[in-house]
Amino acid sequence: MPPRIRLPTTVAAPSRRAALTSPAARRTLSTTPARRARESGDAEDDNVKFDKNKQAVENFKSWLRGPGENFKKPLYYEMNYISSYDRKTWQRVGTDKDRMNIPFPLNPAFRSHPVLSEELKEEIYLRIMGSGRSVRSVSAELGVGLERVAAVTRLKAVEKQWIAEGKPIATYLTKALHMMLPVTKLVAEGEIQPFHENLQDIPSHPLSHRQAFVPVSESRVFTRADAGKEFGLPPAEEVVPHPDLIELHREKSYGLDLNERIDKQRERDRRAAARREERERKAKAKRRERGQLIEKGRWVWRLKEATTGAVGHRYGVPHEDRKKGQIKIPTKVL
């Protein structure tokens, strides 16, 4: 048996607990990279963190001096989104408006709706108020919805009234919108005006919200008219804002040339104008039958021409409710 060597009394033998709790042992027992980084004694000090933040700020300022210069001044009648540029070279992608019209790169399905140019608004106002055209015909010719055509006409009338009265007009907002959003411009005479929006949108009717199961034979052709009849509604081609456009498309599919389609459309416009004049004539006649209205404060008098003794009751005749046996309580609900 070999002799045992006694340790010097000045050196204390480390205990097992102290050995396991020492920093060196903890570094040895660490298994995950994050824990080893934390236990390595502050891998990154405050100076290194400050340098990273400073570097990020410098990179942002450098981007503003470089590609960011494209976004300081908006472009008139053009979209100036991030998607309008190549992310590598920061050059304009060209004339592909569908690719350029993506204001949010992380949401490519969203598209900015265009706005009307001032020239197109003025043309709408002149055709309706100057030429006396109907709202429906102007909407079909210029590709603008019925509600938008009516709104533009009213606002243009207010604008011209304010200008005549000397009131200031805030045109800077319109110019700012034209710089940031796509604009529908008025084309030259003889060219086809592009559609500003879909003209044939039909609002959802409450009667069509229910489900309907209709058994039909295989040989039967189930049309839109049959579906509308089932819901108690007219067919879709009759309730769209512009049924004439459907007729034009149908005539084109039948093989009619352009001149024949134009002649048929003119005939439809003539019949529509005749119906509109007939409605206006009946409305005027109905107003004349009602008599003249005179409003005075809270009272309204209606004056009608009459012959003495032909209308009304004679003076001095008592009312029926003064007689005996008359029912004086309501017997029906209006």
Image (tube, rainbow, N blue to C red):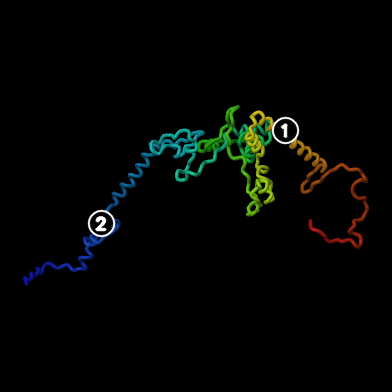
Give the mark nearest the N terminus, 2 or 1: 2
Left or right side of 212 for 88:
left
Please state which of residues 216 and 51 is positioned toward the viewer in this rendering.
216
Left or right side of 285 for 88:
left
Residue holding disc 2: 41
> Dot 1 lies on which element?
helix
Q: Residue at x 38, y 36 (%)?
A: 89
Report if the CB atoms under discs 2 and 1 are less than 8 Å apart.
no
Please state which of residues 283 and 95 is positioned toward the viewer in this rendering.
95
Give the percent coordinates (x, y) of residue 271.
73, 35
Q: Cα distance, mark 2 to mark 1? A: 91 Å
Which quarter of the figure is the C terminus placed in?
bottom right
Residue 270, numbered label:
1
> Dot 2 lies on which element?
loop
Can residue 222 be seen? no
Can residue 7 be seen? yes
Q: Residue furthest bottom?
A: 1
Q: Residue at x 82, y 45 (%)?
A: 302
Q: Residue at x 12, y 67 (%)?
A: 11
Which quadrant of the view contains residue 266?
top right
Please state which of residues 278 and 290 is positioned toward the viewer in this rendering.
278
Query: What amino acid does circle 1 point to?
Result: Arg
Give the percent coordinates (x, y) of residue 232.
69, 50
Which quadrant of the view contains residue 83?
top left
Give the percent coordinates (x, y) of residue 5.
7, 69
Left or right side of 50 for 126:
right
